[in-house]
Amino acid sequence: MLTKNITLKGKTVLVTGVAGFIGSNLAKKLLQDISDIKVVGIDNMNDYYDVRLKEERLKDLSSFLSFVFIKGDIADKSTIDKLFAEYRPTVVVNLAAQAGVRYSISNPDAYIASNLTGFYNILEACRHSYDNAQTGVEHLVYASSSSVYGSNKKVPYSTEDKVDNPVSLYAATKKSNELMAHAYSKLYNIPSVGLRFFTVYGPAGRPDMAYFGFTDKLVKGENIKIFNYGNCRRDFTYIDDIVEGIVRVMQHAPEKQNGEDGLPIPPYKVYNIGNNNPESLLDFVTILQEELVRAGILPTDYDFEAHKELVAMQPGDVPVTYADTTPLEQDFGFKPSTSLRNGLRAFAEWYKNYYG
């Protein structure tokens, strides 16, 4: 197991996409658990989904005196440069991204701006944080995605697998992030770790995700579409497990060292964070239904069968996601473990409380 080489206590941490699902949960955990930490968050508050959810998350964070929020876009270089000059973050966690595989087919421009231009601006700011012999950024952690594996036939997905065949623009931008980070790690000795997240879910999550969207539709009496006729399996990973993984990774940056040529060996790593337990979509829907009834969101006599449609696979989708988390376990002594039932129960209880 790796020993910690980054102390978060007394540090300034930048979290991009801080009003997002993962970003807000990470910021809250850091502010609650780490003494004397300052969290600077940036988010453009776009309307990809209900902005009220994002505002609710920010309201929750605003109660912490050591939290600073900046409304801005990481695709705007001057905003990022100004932020780095003013706050000088020592750890950067880049979670700002245009998410969603299907949306990338109809709205490609948003993905280029946020996922490529935005990440480039973050990398450049990290590079220049070392100017004039300053200590600069000690660790850059950034969100990648299980989508980089495409329709990889070998399971579970390992970070050693070849990932050169993305099946969506979203996946291509995430693979590009890994390549860009590797180049900057090599050229400028920036310690960086990419995290390939697997189907993140939980309370106050993203309404475009299946568990949330299905719930909204069932409450309205609408039909839900189950893709690939239910023959899909997903490695659903609960939000608390994702955040715990990020916090552990933040505290160990890849070591800086030079090769035989005297040039830096890139201080660069990539890890999977997934539940290591793919569940079929039909089982997932069954558990969701049971938990929605248990929470009192739907009546006990709700006719679920009448509201299910089995349909063909969507463009950009893959039949299975399955994380090999062995390196994460070996290096950090951690693997996600929240069961799908417990996670969906927490979501259902939150949904009932939030929407009534």
Image (cartoon, helix red, strand yellow):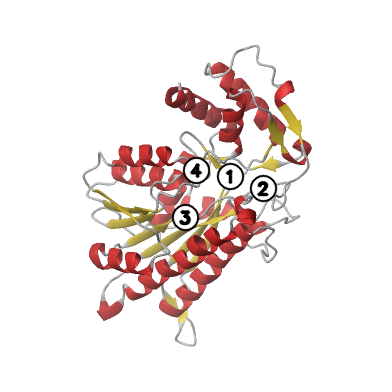
Relative to 277, is 273 above or below?
Answer: below
Callout 1, which amino acid? Thr
The residue pinned by badge 4 equals 49
Could you classify mark 1 by the number of other residues whose Cα lies within 10 Å: few (under 14), some (14-19), or many (20 or more)?
many
Mark 4 element type: loop
Mark 2 element type: loop
Quarter of the C terminus within the rendering: top left
Callout 3, which amino acid? Met
Percent across and percent down for residue 345 are: 53, 26
**Quarter where residue 10 is shown:** bottom left
| Residues marked 2 and 1 touching at CB (< 8 Å) | yes
The residue pinned by badge 2 equals 321
Disc 4 and disc 2: Cα gap in Å?
24 Å
| Residues marked 4 and 3 touching at CB (< 8 Å) | no
Q: Which residue is located at x 76 percent, y 55 percent? A: 153
The residue pinned by badge 3 equals 1
Q: Earlier in the sequence, mark 4 or mark 3?
A: 3
Q: Earlier in the sequence, mark 3 or mark 2?
A: 3
- Inspect this view and state whether residue 159 appears: no
Callout 4, which amino acid? Tyr
Which of these two is toward me, 240 or 307?
A: 307
| Residues marked 4 and 2 touching at CB (< 8 Å) | no
The residue pinned by badge 1 equals 199
| Residues marked 1 and 4 touching at CB (< 8 Å) | no
Q: Earlier in the sequence, mark 4 or mark 2?
A: 4
- Inspect this view and state whether residue 19 appears: yes
Could you classify mark 3 by the number of other residues whose Cα lies within 10 Å: few (under 14), some (14-19), or many (20 or more)?
few
Disc 1 and disc 3: Cα gap in Å?
26 Å
Callout 2, which amino acid? Thr
